[in-house]
């Protein structure tokens, strides 16, 4: 089993145990997260690290859109899944293409992606405010 597979297995075990939260980050919101992280906001700093890692991975090796499975090399939206307890350093990023990253219906599409990735997940991420955090 690769290190990546081991990490994902540990992440899955944890979120089935404690639940999952979800941050939806569009290109236009990324700069605000970086500014908040630089101002000492610890949650923004963790999100910034997770988004930077996910975008870097997709730029090096294009990934499939988490919704429609089209290849993505420049994601419109990055969805970051965290365990509900926000365990430091534990997150999984999902890339969404331009079409699937459209704001209309984005939360529902994100929930569908989580359902498909983690069958049997009892509590799916719910929106806590428009356009940023689900």
Image (cartoon, rainbow, N blue to C red):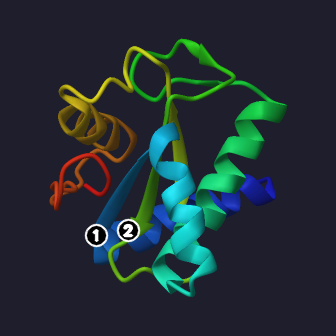
Find residue 22 and report its horizontal and vertical position in percent.
34, 58
Find residue 46 and report its horizontal and vertical position in percent.
57, 74
Q: Residue at x 37, y 68 (%)?
A: 15
Q: Is residue 78 left or right of residue 16?
A: right
Is label 2 in a helix, a strand or a loop? helix
Kindly tell me whether residue 87 is visible in this rendering: no
Find residue 51 and report its horizontal and vertical position in percent.
60, 54
Find residue 127 and report its horizontal and vertical position in percent.
16, 54
Kindly tell me whether residue 67 is visible in this rendering: yes
Q: Residue at x 46, y 18 (%)?
A: 98
Q: Residue at x 35, y 47 (%)?
A: 118
The numbered disc on residue 19 is 1
The numbered disc on residue 77 is none
38, 1: nearer the viewer: 38
Is label 1 in a helix, a strand or a loop? loop
Residue assigned mark 2:
15
Relative to 82, is 118 above or below?
Answer: above
In the picture, which quadrant includes the N terminus? bottom right
Q: Is residue 94 left or right of residue 123?
A: right
Q: How many marks?
A: 2
Q: Is residue 119 left or right of residue 126?
A: right
Report, in whole angstroms, how far the alpha carbon at label 1 lies from the one at label 2: 5 Å
The image quadrant that residue 109 belongs to is top left
In the picture, which quadrant includes the C terminus? bottom left
Q: Residue at x 53, y 51 (%)?
A: 30
Q: Is residue 134 left or right of residue 52?
A: left
72, 39: nearer the viewer: 39
Relative to 53, is 33 above or below?
Answer: below
Relative to 9, is 67 above or below?
Answer: above
Category of crowding for the residue at label 2, using alpha-carbon neighbours closer than 10 angstroms: few (below 14), some (14–19), many (at least 20) = many
**Pointer 1 and pointer 2: residues touching (CB < 8 Å)?**
yes
């Amino acid at each position: 089993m690769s290190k990546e597979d081991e990490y994902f297995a540990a992440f899955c075990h944890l979120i089935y145990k404690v639940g999952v939260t979800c941050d939806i980050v569009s290109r236009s919101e990324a700069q605000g997260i970086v500014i908040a992280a630089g101002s000492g906001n610890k949650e923004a700093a963790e999100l910034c690290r997770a988004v930077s890692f996910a975008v870097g991975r997709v730029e090096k090796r294009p990934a499939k859109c988490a919704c429609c499975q089209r290849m993505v090399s420049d994601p419109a939206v990055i969805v970051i899944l965290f365990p509900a307890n926000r365990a430091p350093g534990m997150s999984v990023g999902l890339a969404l293409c331009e079409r699937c990253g459209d704001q209309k219906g984005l939360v529902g599409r994100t929930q569908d992606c989580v359902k498909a990735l983690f069958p049997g997940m009892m509590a799916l991420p719910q929106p806590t405010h428009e356009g940023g955090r689900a």
